Every structure is written in structure tokens, then in C-alpha cells.
Amino acid sequence: MWPADMSVPKVGVLVVNLGTPDEPTAPAIRRYLRQFLSDPRVIEIPRLVWWPILNGPILLSRPRKLVERYAGIWMEGGSPLLVYSQRQAFGLEKTLRARGHEVEVEIGMRYGNPSLESALQKLRDKGCERILTLSLYPQYAASTTATVVDEVCRIASRMRNQPEMRFIKRFHDFEPYIDAVASKIEHAWSEGSRPEKLVMSFHGLPRRCADLGDPYCKDSYGTARALAKRLDLTDDQYLVTFQSRFGPAEWLQPYTEPTLIKLAESGVRHVDVVCPGFLADCLETLEEISIECRDAFMNAGGQQFRYIPCLNDDQQWVEGLTSLVLDHLQGWPTRAHGD
Ligand SMILES: C=CC1=C(C)c2cc3[nH]c(cc4nc(cc5[nH]c(cc1n2)c(C)c5CCC(=O)O)C(CCC(=O)O)=C4C)c(C)c3C=C
Ligand SMILES: [Fe+2]
Ligand SMILES: [Fe+2]
């Protein structure tokens, strides 16, 4: 306990997500991709080999191809990934305060804006002496979670007066997270019929990362099993797949789109697809799954394809996020002095 005459160090929560372009234009997408794909945690091949590939074929052609796809999902407040991440951070701060915890919350993006540096600076300017970093990735991967830890520590390495820092590593089987995703699925089922198969599609990762010990694949299966248990699904009622393969190397299998095509070809008429690893809808869900994979499934003979949205600004999830943060703030008092 803090003696009554001592002020309690102020606590801040840095909520982090991947990042997204500032606008759906080729120059903005190029800027974002350059920063993202220059991260050695994301592309683990020697810089000398990667640099000409990135600055040649990838940055010359990919941004232009993505303009239309981003434009098609753009929201009034910006890219869905940013809009929903902001709403989660705002909801978290509001709920923490409603539960009596004096905590500052800021959102930062690992790539693009608002930058992690600006978000950390805002927390420091508000007087936060203790900072908990929460990356919005339930499953741990070096290319997502670890690179946030690296970057936050790199920023702190330039501070004379550093805050005390904590990081949440993963929450792939945290009950309120599983419950919130399950409720979303049950809500879809309450509005229509149950599918023949529930496809749980996670973002992919190069196979080599898993072979080298990245726990992401195990975490994803852990989430899927917890969801199946919570929804009372038998093994033949659901499937785990991996999407968004990038480059020629082998990624985690089975791949989402080819699996959906095979399902349709083998006579499965109705599937539901949910992406539990994404907490906010984004290009990879609204475009790749909800448009491209839907087309692939229907063209292969499928009859009903339902995409179940991400948690986004779901109130049950905001409450879950608040419990997750409070679990990790233990030992850091947060109540306003005199409460
Ligand atoms: C080798 C490259 C990539 C790895 C490894 C990777 C891992 C990874 N990514 C996410 C979450 C998201 N990725 C998103 C977009 C995206 N991902 C890659 C490449 C890798 N991802 C690229 C090149 C892109 C940009 C789009 C494209 O060019 O295809 C997004 C959406 C961003 C948005 O603006 O909407 C998310 C979210 C995870 C969770 C992950 C590791 C598990
Ligand atoms: Fe705030
Ligand atoms: Fe990705």
C-alpha cells in the first residue's frame, strides 16, 4: 500500500496494433509497406538479398494493386484497422474509469500513424510513470508481438527518465476473449441457420518461423480448441486454416482459400468463416476473406458463405479487454489518490 501522503505513480496503457496506410493512395500504401516490410522481425532474410526485392518488384507494383482494395473498405474515420483499434482503446479507457481506475490510454501503431513514439510521448506528457503495453494480438508471434516489444524498448532506450514498463505477451485462451468471439458466432447463428462447417481462419506465418520455435501456430490451435469447446463443436464441425500468404515460401497450412474451394467441391454448401486472430476488421478480413474467399467458395459450387465480423467495437469485448488489462496491472495501484 502507498502511504496516504505519497502520490501513486500514474499508470498508462499503450494499446498497439499493426498499422495501416494513412489513406488509400499508392504513395501512402508504399510508405506503410516500406516501413512494415523493412522490419527484420517480419522478413527474416538477409538485408542485402531483401533490399533489391523490396525496392524493386514489391514497392513498385504492390501499392498500385492495393489502392482499389483499400478504397473499397475505407471508413469515414479512416482505415477500419485504425478506426476499430481506436474505438477499443477509447472503450477501454472509459470502462477502466467507470470501474474507478484512473488510467490513461493511448493507441499507437507499429507501422504508420499514430506512431508508437508519439503515443508513448503522450503518455509521458500526461505524467505516466508506469506503462503497460497491450498489443492487440491474442496469439504471440515474433513478427507481431515481439517487434512491438523491440520498438517500445528502442524508443525507451533514448529516454533519460524511463517509465517502468510491462508487456502482455498473449491472451489466446483468455476466457473473456473466447467468450466474446463465441458470442459473435452465436449471434450470427441466432439470425440464420448453422453452417455445415465453421472455418476459423488465422493470419498465416512462414512455416520456417514455426519450425524455429515461434509458438504462433500452437497459440492459434489453442484458441480454436477453446472456441470449439465453448461452442460445443465436435471435431468435424470446424476447421482451422491460415490466410494471407505472402511470397513464394511455404506458410502454415492448410491455406484458407484452397480449403474453401475443396470444401465446396466436396459438396459442402454452407460455411461460416470467422477470423479470431484479428480483433479489428481490416484488409485481410473485409477484402481477402469476405470478398475473395467468398467468390472462390461460391464459384466452386458453394451456396452460402457467411463472414462473421471481428470483435471491433463490441461491448462484451471492451469489458473483456478491461479485465485483461486489470489482471496485468496487479501491483500497480490505479485508484485516484484519496479514493
Ligand atoms: C512476410 C510478411 C508478413 C508476415 C510474417 C505477417 C504476419 C502477420 N500479419 C498480421 C496481421 C496483419 N497483416 C496485415 C497486412 C499485411 N501483412 C503482410 C505481410 C505479413 N504479415 C502484408 C504485406 C500486409 C499488407 C497488405 C498486403 O500487402 O497484402 C493486416 C491488415 C493491415 C490493414 O491495413 O488492414 C493485419 C491486421 C499478423 C497477425 C501476423 C502474424 C501472425
Ligand atoms: Fe486518453
Ligand atoms: Fe500480415
Image (cartoon, helix red, strand yellow):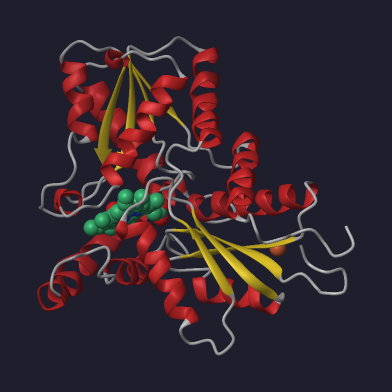
User: Where's the C terminus, which quadrant?
Assistant: bottom right
Looking at the image, which residue is at 85% across and 65% down?
A: 337
Residue 278, compared with residue 293, is above or below; it is below
The image position of residue 203, as x and y in percent, is: 31, 44
Looking at the image, which residue is at 38% across and 71% down?
A: 150
The image position of residue 149, as x and y in percent, is: 42, 67
Looking at the image, which residue is at 72% across and 50% down?
A: 96
**Residue 240 appears in which quarter of the rendering?**
top left
- From where the camera sits, is residue 289 visible? yes
149 relative position to 3: left or right: left
Looking at the image, which residue is at 31% across and 34% down?
A: 221
Q: Nearer the viewer, residue 305 or 167?
A: 167
Q: Nearer the viewer, residue 272 or 121?
A: 121
The image position of residue 144, as x and y in percent, is: 36, 58
204 relative position to 249: left or right: right
Q: How many marks?
A: 0
Name of the residue lying farthest toward the bottom? 160
User: Where's the N terminus, which quadrant?
Assistant: bottom right
Residue 179, compared with residue 304, is above or below; it is below
Residue 48, compared with residue 267, is above or below; it is below
- From where the camera sits, is residue 68 visible? no
150 relative position to 329: left or right: left
